C-alpha cells in the first residue's frame, strides 16, 4: 500500500506568464520570417507548459502519478505547475453523508428486524483511497452495510428478548453508535477513510412480526402498570386497617376484615368508577 506523500509544487502564475510570453514570441518570430522556430516553440508551449498547470480547489486534492509511479499529493489549494507528464486524479477531502438503505437482518436472538444507519466519512489518506481499493466510494458503501449487519447480529432488539443483556439496539443507542463507528474505522482504514460519525437512523421489527411484538410490548406494559397499582392498593388497605385499629373507630373480626379488604381492592384496582351500595342496616346485614 502506498503511503501518502504531500508535495508543494511551484506557483502556476509565473509559469502561466511564461506561457503567454512564449505565445507572443512565436508571433514575433513568424512576423520576422522564422515560422519553423515559431511553430516549434508554439508546440512545445502547448505540450509542455500548459498541461502542467493545475488548479486545486479548497478541500480538494490532486493525486499525481508519473509513468505508473505515485509521485505525491497536492492538498494545498491554489494554482500550481507540476510535471506535464503526470496523471492528475482529483480526490475530494470534503465530508460525505451516507444514508444507508434499510436492511432486513436477524438480531442476536434471531428476530427479524429492519435497521439503517447514517454515516459521515471523509478521505484521510488519498494514496490509500486511490491505490488500495478499486473504487473507494463503492468500498465505503459495501463495508458500511456489512458493519451494520454485524452490529445487528451482535445485540438483541430490546430487553424483552434478552433480559440479561446490558446493551440492546433500542435502549443502548449511544453505546451502539460508538461500537459502529469503531468497527467502520477498522474496516475502512485500508482505503484511507476516516469515519467522523455513525448513527442508527432506523430501527424496527420486520413487518411480519411487528404486530405480535407490539401486542407483547403492550401486554408487558399493562402487567407492569397493574403490578404498580396492586402494590399501591395493598399499601392503602394496610394503612386503612392500621388507622381504624389505632383509633378504635370500629372493631372488625377476621371475616369482616377480609370483606373490607376485598371491597377496597375492587375499588382501588378497578378500571372503571365503582358505584357503591350504601348499607343502611347494621354492619352484619
Image (spheres, rainbow, N blue to C red):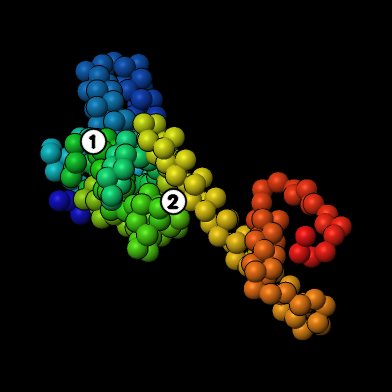
Q: Secondary structure at mark 2?
A: loop
Instruction: Work out whether residue 212 or residue 243 is closer to the camera in this orientation and state it.
Output: 243
Quadrant in the picture for residue 62: top left
Instruction: Work out whether residue 49 or residue 78 is closer to the camera in this orientation and state it.
Output: 78
- Whole-percent x and y of residue 41? 26, 26
Instruction: Work out whether residue 249 or residue 205 is closer to the camera in this orientation and state it.
Output: 249
Q: Assess disc 2: are there few (<14), some (14-19) or many (≥20) residues with their C-alpha within 10 Å of its C-alpha.
A: some
Q: Secondary structure at mark 1?
A: loop
Placement of 206 over or under 26, stated as above or below: below
Q: Could you tell me which residue is drawn at 82 percent across and 78 percent down?
A: 249
Q: Could you tell me which residue is drawn at 53 percent across and 57 percent down?
A: 224
Q: Which residue is mark 2?
A: 170
Placement of 241 over or under 70, stated as above or below: below
Q: Assess disc 1: are there few (<14), some (14-19) or many (≥20) residues with their C-alpha within 10 Å of its C-alpha.
A: few
Asked whether the viewer can see residue 178, the reply is no
Q: Marks 1 and 2: which is nearer the front?
A: 2
Placement of 243 over or under 121, stated as above or below: below
Would residue 262 be found to the left or right of residue 179 on screen?
Answer: right
Placement of 214 over or under 259, stated as above or below: above
Residue 135 shows which numbered tag?
1
Amino acid at each position: 500500500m502506498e503511503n501518502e506523500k504531500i508535495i508543494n509544487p511551484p506557483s502556476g502564475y509565473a509559469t502561466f506568464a511564461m506561457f503567454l510570453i512564449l505565445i507572443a514570441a512565436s508571433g514575433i518570430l513568424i512576423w520576422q520570417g522564422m515560422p519553423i522556430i515559431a511553430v516549434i516553440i508554439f508546440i512545445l508551449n502547448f505540450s509542455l507548459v500548459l498541461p502542467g498547470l493545475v488548479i486545486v480547489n479548497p478541500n480538494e486534492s490532486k493525486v499525481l502519478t508519473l509513468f505508473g509511479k505515485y509521485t505525491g499529493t497536492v492538498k494545498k489549494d491554489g494554482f500550481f505547475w507540476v510535471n506535464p507528464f503526470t496523471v492528475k486524479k482529483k480526490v475530494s477531502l470534503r465530508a460525505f453523508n451516507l444514508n444507508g438503505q434499510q436492511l432486513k437482518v436477524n438480531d442476536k436472538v434471531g428476530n427479524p428486524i429492519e435497521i439503517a444507519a447514517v454515516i459521515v466519512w471523509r478521505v484521510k489518506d488519498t494514496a490509500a483511497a486511490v491505490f488500495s481499493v478499486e473504487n473507494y466510494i463503492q468500498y465505503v458503501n459495501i463495508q458500511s452495510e456489512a458493519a451494520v449487519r454485524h452490529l445487528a447480529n451482535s445485540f438483541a432488539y430490546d430487553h424483552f428478548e434478552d433480559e440479561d443483556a446490558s446493551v440492546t439496539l433500542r435502549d443502548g443507542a449511544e453505546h451502539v453508535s460508538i461500537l459502529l463507528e469503531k468497527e467502520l474505522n477498522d474496516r475502512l482504514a485500508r482505503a484511507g477513510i476516516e469515519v467522523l460519525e455513525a448513527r442508527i437512523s432506523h430501527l424496527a421489527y420486520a413487518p411480519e412480526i411487528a404486530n405480535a411484538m407490539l401486542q407483547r410490548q403492550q401486554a408487558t406494559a399493562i402487567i407492569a402498570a397493574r403490578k404498580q397499582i396492586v402494590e399501591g392498593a395493598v399499601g392503602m388497605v394496610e394503612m386503612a386497617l392500621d388507622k381504624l385499629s389505632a383509633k378504635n373507630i370500629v372493631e372488625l373480626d377476621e371475616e369482616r376484615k377480609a370483606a373490607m379488604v376485598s371491597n377496597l381492592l375492587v375499588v382501588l384496582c378497578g378500571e372503571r368508577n365503582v358505584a357503591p351500595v350504601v348499607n343502611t342496616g347494621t354492619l352484619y346485614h
